[in-house]
């Protein structure tokens, strides 16, 4: 019954989404407000219907309704509650429903936000949003119906893939989807601006928060994905350039470029065409990312559902988006003239430009490496793959250059930097970076890439700190506030600027964590009970195996005592889990984290009393996750609603009344 | 005015060329040919020493694991021909008789295929329906 309601809601939502498109367009063309309003109500209806659909699928999971094929394929009676909920988006059909549901909610929010503004472009914004919803809803109705029932009701479901039974996997997919789906909003505004010819920067200002929101969640989603790979896949790394990883990384890279280049349009009225191109590419790549996970065109650890039809439909949709957007852009080209020109190489505009070129270049390299196997097979008939070495070799120099620009860009003057501006802002950070790099060299770091990366990281951190110190000092002198208070209100009164610096700082920490992997050390050994293995300054003594059952699995755990410089510092228990209904074990790694390095141990195998371990030292690993927290903090600060405008009007009111 | 524009265009071109070079040299150094077992065997001597990514199925009862040397020996097949594989390192969870695997490495006249990477396809969990048919 509930599932029928769910399916029915999706079907109705499909019809209503089309209705909203048609009414909006006709309303706009004929200038009839009532039709436009009706289209807007259609958007609200779609989100209501899809909320019902999502709730009924969730209900099917919670009530273990195994008559629903999707529920039977991804859950079982003994699955813990949280993972029963996350099974919602463990497979293809549920993920598509999640996508459509998020899109409908965002669309409703856009409608509500713009009740009183952007009247001119809103009908087209709604059309673009609802056409996208229509596409996903058609997939749900005609191809990937999550409410499909089977004739036979199995007594129990097949359970959830053990690899997905991890806290990271609870939040990783929805986080990523918030990002993917969120980019639909700025894209819709961009297309609407092109269609109406209202090409000022209102569309950019209206979607600034949406862009930040999407960019932020896409980034966090990527980071959560690598955290999951690190603790769950048990191979000691966090990123392996799997096509699906690249798929979610690419829209983030172009999104980063877009996020920066719109600032130039806001401030200087330049790069208008470029911004259009960037948001179109970002959106297309978001759909492409969803497509890559869904289609199975590329072999990968986490592609699900090899349904070629679904793949073609996605490719077709992307093709239509690109063709339509490009034609539209070409038609409107004359209206997209820049107000200004670039003045000098040594200016903030030009660093923005280079930041953009580098980000897009990196995206192109990743894209090339990801799709090259398909192209090569189609063109030359030879199947070729490029692995992580390719991606590392190509992207590392680009990312180092970006790191340098991250340091220069926020401090260099607009238009044309004078020598005074350069020495004032860069002398101290430059010297700090050089001294830091020199110190690391003396301490014995000889890897060139790592040295450059650390030196640049120190340089950029110094520029950011200098900004904070100067700002705080100025504020203290101006207001007479105490140090800490001045610092906090500095950040709070200029959220966009200082939040941005904090995000940069988070990115630097992530760079440091990634650079640490250059110094990774591995050791594999087979030990008999009582024997030890030594890796760097750690000694691991093997104390034996224990075997015990838990709620839905059988655990084999090895106990290792960890010694450092003769002192016992802890116990690690790497495990193998045998989940019910699975004929293969799942490796559960043991990690001991410090700021300096991670000790990472895998139980690779066991035979009687012998066990084989792989121990890895991952230097500076924890900084990646710290970077994630810092980035989140910065993101929250930027996204926090600004009450300045209200404050100002109040101030004015008070002044007028003479208070 | 013109001169300034020219400088930016030159800067862009240099960036573009550097990117092209990075991609080109990266491809040359790291490209792997993706082949089936038969395709590799049919190449004969010319296949020796070249970086290859090989897909196939693990032959039943061919697995030999030396826990002291941490060396895994097994045969893989594409249904027509089979090839012995030697791999050193940690064996993935999904590896077993009959599993679909991907190995990366090179083929040598002695001792068959030396794999540096061993990937076992994730469990068919994602596609239970198709799996029952095979």
Image: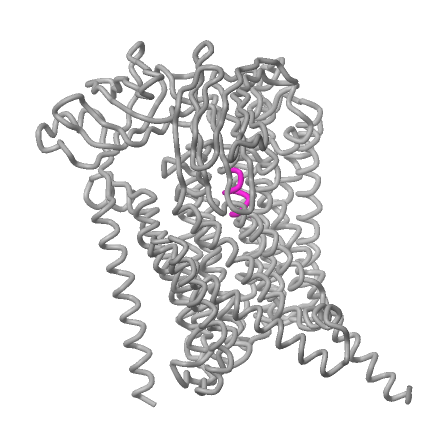
- In the figure, is residue A226 to the left or right of A370? right
Residue B83, image quadrant: top left
Q: Residue A359: percent from the left, percent from the top?
A: 41, 62
- In the figure, is residue A304 to the left or right of A118? left
User: Residue at 34% across / 50% down in the picture?
Assistant: A392
- In the figure, is residue A459 to the left or right of A377? right
Colour mapping? one colour
Residue A124, image quadrant: bottom right
Is A516 magenta? The answer is: no
- Image quadrant where one finds the N terminus of chain A: top right
Q: Work out whether A459 lies above or below A421.
A: above
Which residue ends up furthest to the left in the rendered image?
Answer: B45
Q: Residue A6: percent from the left, percent from the top?
A: 67, 34
Q: Work out whether A213 lies above or below A302.
A: below
The rendered magenta stretch, by its main secondary structure, is classed as: helix
Q: Work out whether A301 lies above or below A247.
A: above
User: Residue at 70% across / 70% down in the picture?
Assistant: A487
Q: Residue A536: percent from the left, percent from the top?
A: 43, 37
- Image quadrant where one finds the C terminus of chain A: bottom right
**Magenta stretch, residue numbers:** A221-228
Is A222 magenta? The answer is: yes
Q: How many labels does the image show?
A: 0
Q: Residue A34: percent from the left, percent from the top?
A: 71, 64
Residue A335 in sight in this render? no
Q: A599 or A625: which is nearer to us?
A: A599
């Amino acid at each position: 019954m509930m599932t029928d309601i769910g399916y029915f809601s999706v079907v109705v939502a499909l019809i209503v989404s089309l209705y909203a498109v048609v009414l909006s367009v006709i309303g706009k063309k004929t200038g009839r407000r009532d039709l436009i309003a009706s289209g807007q109500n259609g958007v609200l209806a779609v989100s209501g219907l899809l909320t019902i659909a999502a709730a009924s699928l969730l209900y099917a999971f919670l009530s273990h309704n195994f008559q629903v094929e999707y529920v039977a394929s991804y859950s079982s009676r003994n699955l813990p509650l949280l993972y029963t909920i996350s099974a919602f988006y463990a497979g293809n059909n549920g993920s598509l429903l999640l996508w459509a549901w998020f899109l409908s909610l965002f669309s409703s929010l856009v409608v509500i936000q713009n009740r009183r503004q952007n009247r001119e472009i809103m009908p087209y914004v709604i059309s673009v949003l609802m056409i996208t919803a229509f596409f996903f809803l058609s997939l749900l109705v005609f191809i990937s119906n999550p409410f499909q029932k089977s004739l036979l009701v199995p007594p129990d479901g097949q359970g959830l893939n053990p690899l997905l039974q991890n806290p990271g996997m609870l939040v990783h997919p929805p986080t990523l989807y918030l990002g993917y789906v969120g980019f639909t909003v700025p894209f819709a505004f961009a297309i609407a601006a092109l269609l109406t010819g209202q090409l000022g920067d209102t569309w950019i200002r209206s979607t600034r928060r949406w862009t930040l929101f999407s960019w932020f969640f896409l980034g966090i989603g990527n980071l959560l994905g690598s955290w999951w790979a690190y603790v769950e896949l048990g191979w000691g790394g966090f990123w392996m350039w799997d096509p699906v990883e690249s798929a979610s990384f690419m829209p983030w890279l172009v999104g980063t470029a877009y996020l920066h280049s719109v600032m130039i349009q806001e401030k200087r009225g330049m790069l208008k065409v470029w911004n259009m191109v960037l948001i179109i590419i970002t959106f297309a790549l978001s759909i492409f990312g969803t497509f890559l996970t869904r289609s199975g065109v590329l072999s990968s650890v986490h592609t699900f559902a090899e349904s070629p039809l679904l793949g073609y439909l996605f490719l077709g949709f992307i093709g239509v988006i690109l063709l339509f957007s490009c034609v539209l852009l070409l038609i409107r080209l004359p209206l997209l003239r820049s107000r200004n020109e670039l003045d000098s190489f040594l200016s903030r505009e030009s660093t923005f430009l280079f930041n953009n070129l580098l980000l897009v270049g990196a995206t192109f390299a990743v894209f090339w490496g990801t799709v090259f196997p398909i192209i090569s097979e189609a063109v030359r008939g030879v199947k070729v793959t490029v692995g992580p070495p390719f991606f590392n070799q190509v992207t590392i120099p680009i990312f180092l250059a970006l790191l340098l620009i991250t340091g220069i860009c926020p401090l260099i003057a607009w238009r044309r930097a004078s020598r005074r501006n350069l020495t004032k802002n860069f002398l101290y950070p430059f010297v700090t970076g050089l001294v830091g790099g020199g110190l690391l060299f003396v301490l014995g770091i000889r890897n060139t890439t790592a040295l450059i990366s650390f030196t640049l990281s120190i340089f950029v951190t110094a520029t950011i700190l200098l900004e904070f110190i100067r700002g705080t000092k100025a504020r203290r002198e101006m207001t007479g506030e105490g140090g800490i208070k001045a610092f906090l209100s500095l950040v709070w009164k200029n959220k966009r600027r200082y939040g941005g610096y904090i995000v940069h700082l988070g990115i630097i920490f992530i760079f440091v964590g990634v650079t640490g992997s250059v110094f990774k050390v591995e050791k594999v050994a087979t030990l008999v009970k009582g024997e030890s293995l030594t890796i760097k300054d750690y000694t691991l003594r093997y104390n034996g195996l224990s075997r015990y059952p838990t709620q839905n699995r059988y655990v084999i755990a090895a106990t290792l005592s960890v010694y450092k410089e003769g002192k016992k510092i802890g116990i690690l228990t790497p495990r193998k889990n045998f989940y019910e209904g699975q004929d293969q074990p799942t490796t559960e790694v043991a990690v001991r984290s410090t700021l300096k390095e991670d000790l990472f141990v895998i139980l690779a195998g066991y035979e009687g009393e012998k066990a084989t371990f792989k121990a890895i030292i991952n230097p500076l690993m924890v900084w990646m996750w710290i970077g994630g927290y810092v980035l989140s903090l910065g993101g929250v600060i930027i996204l926090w609603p600004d009450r300045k405008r209200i404050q100002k009007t109040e101030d004015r009111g008070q002044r007028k009344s003479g208070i | 005015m013109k001169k300034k524009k020219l400088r930016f265009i030159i800067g862009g071109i240099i960036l573009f060329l550097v990117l092209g070079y990075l991609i080109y040299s990266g491809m040359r150094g790291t490209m792997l040919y993706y082949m089936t077992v038969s395709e590799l065997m049919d190449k004969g001597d010319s296949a020796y020493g070249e970086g290859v990514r090989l897909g196939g199925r693990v032959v039943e009862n061919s697995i030999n694991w030396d826990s002291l040397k941490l060396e895994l020996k097994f045969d893989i097949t594409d249904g027509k021909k089979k090839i012995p594989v030697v791999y050193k390192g940690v064996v993935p969870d999904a590896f077993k008789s009959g599993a679909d695997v991907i190995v990366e490495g090179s083929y040598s006249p002695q001792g068959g295929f030396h794999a540096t990477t061993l990937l076992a396809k994730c469990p068919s969990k994602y596609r239970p329906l198709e799996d029952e048919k095979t």
